């Protein structure tokens, strides 16, 4: 199932309600709470999802665990799956401004962004291209993983192979 969280959860629920006994695979992302608004945990059991590692903390490193703990403590809820991207970009901008010697010359800041590695404070697992966080297209790549729904939550199984150079070359070919 390819699609947004709620339609995918509906398909998984409906397959269970119809008595279909077949493997269910998706590429959707989304949190447990989002899926459980549409399908029960029992209806989700065994579903596979190929998804960005985002905030499945067991798939990420210590920075992610600290980020989730601090965010949850401050706001009383877990962060949304897209929030670490914004968090990480603050450090991209911080490092670029420092490298440029200030924020006044935006061309210098942009040049610094183009040559930045992944900030040490980053939450996400970025896959550098040519040693930098962003490729020549300005695209950053994050890892994807295989997850399975087990006993009420997504369980990280493994990272998926990624070829950032091929992705980058393809995106560049679209601009020609």
Image: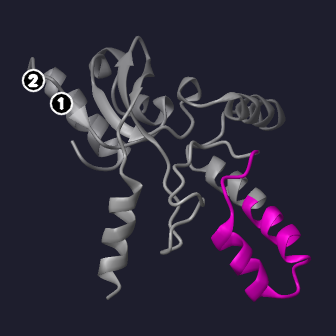
Residue 20's place in the image compared with 129, above or below, is: above
Left or right: where does residue 162 sit relative to residue 3?
right
Query: Where residue 123 appears, x then y in whole percent?
Result: 67, 42
Disc 2: which residue: 18
Q: Circle 1 sits in a helix, a strand or a loop, which is it?
A: helix
Q: Circle 2 sits in a helix, a strand or a loop, which is it?
A: loop
The N terminus sits in image quarter: top left
- Boundaries of the magenta span: 92-120
Disc 1: which residue: 14
Q: Residue furthest front?
A: 130
Instruction: Please tell me which residue lies in front, 2 or 147.
Output: 147
Query: Where residue 41 appears, x then y in whole percent?
Result: 37, 18
Residue 97's place in the image compared with 6, above or below, is: below
Count neighbours of disc 1 (C-alpha within 10 A) and say few if under 14, some if 14 to 19, many if 20 or more.
some
Q: Quarter of the image holding residue 71?
A: top right
Q: Residue at x 34, y 49 (%)?
A: 4
Q: Residue at x 50, y 31 (%)?
A: 33
| Magenta stretch, main secondary structure class | helix
Query: Where residue 91 appears, x then y in whole percent?
Result: 77, 57
Query: Where residue 108 appears, x then y in whole percent?
Result: 78, 83
Left or right: where does residue 16 sit relative to residue 95?
left
Label 2 vs label 1: CA separation? 6 Å
Q: Residue at x 54, y 54 (%)?
A: 128
Residue 8's place in the image compared with 83, above or below, is: above
Query: Quick check: marks 2 and 1 in contact, CB under 8 Å?
Result: yes
Q: Quarter of the image holding residue 14?
A: top left
Q: Quarter of the image holding residue 36?
A: top left
The C terminus sits in image quarter: bottom left
Instruction: Please tell me which residue lies in front, 90 or 8.
Output: 90
Q: Magenta span has 14?
A: no
Q: Magenta span has 118?
A: yes
């Amino acid at each position: 199932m390819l699609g947004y969280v709620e339609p995918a959860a509906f398909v998984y629920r409906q397959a269970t309600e119809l008595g279909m006994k077949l493997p269910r695979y998706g590429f959707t992302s989304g949190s447990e709470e989002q899926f459980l608004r549409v399908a029960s945990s029992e209806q989700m059991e065994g579903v596979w999802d190929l998804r960005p590692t985002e905030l499945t903390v067991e798939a990420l490193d210590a920075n992610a665990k600290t980020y989730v703990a601090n965010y949850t403590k401050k706001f009383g809820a877990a962060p949304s799956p897209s929030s670490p991207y914004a968090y990480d970009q603050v450090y991209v901008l911080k490092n670029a401004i420092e490298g440029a010697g200030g924020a006044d010359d935006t061309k210098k800041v942009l040049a610094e962004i183009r040559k930045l590695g992944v900030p040490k404070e980053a939450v996400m697992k970025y896959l550098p291209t040519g040693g930098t966080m962003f490729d020549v297209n300005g695209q950053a790549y994050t890892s994807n993983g295989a997850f399975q729904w087990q006993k009420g939550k997504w369980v990280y199984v493994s990272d998926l192979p990624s070829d950032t150079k091929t992705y980058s070359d393809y995106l560049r070919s679209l601009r020609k």
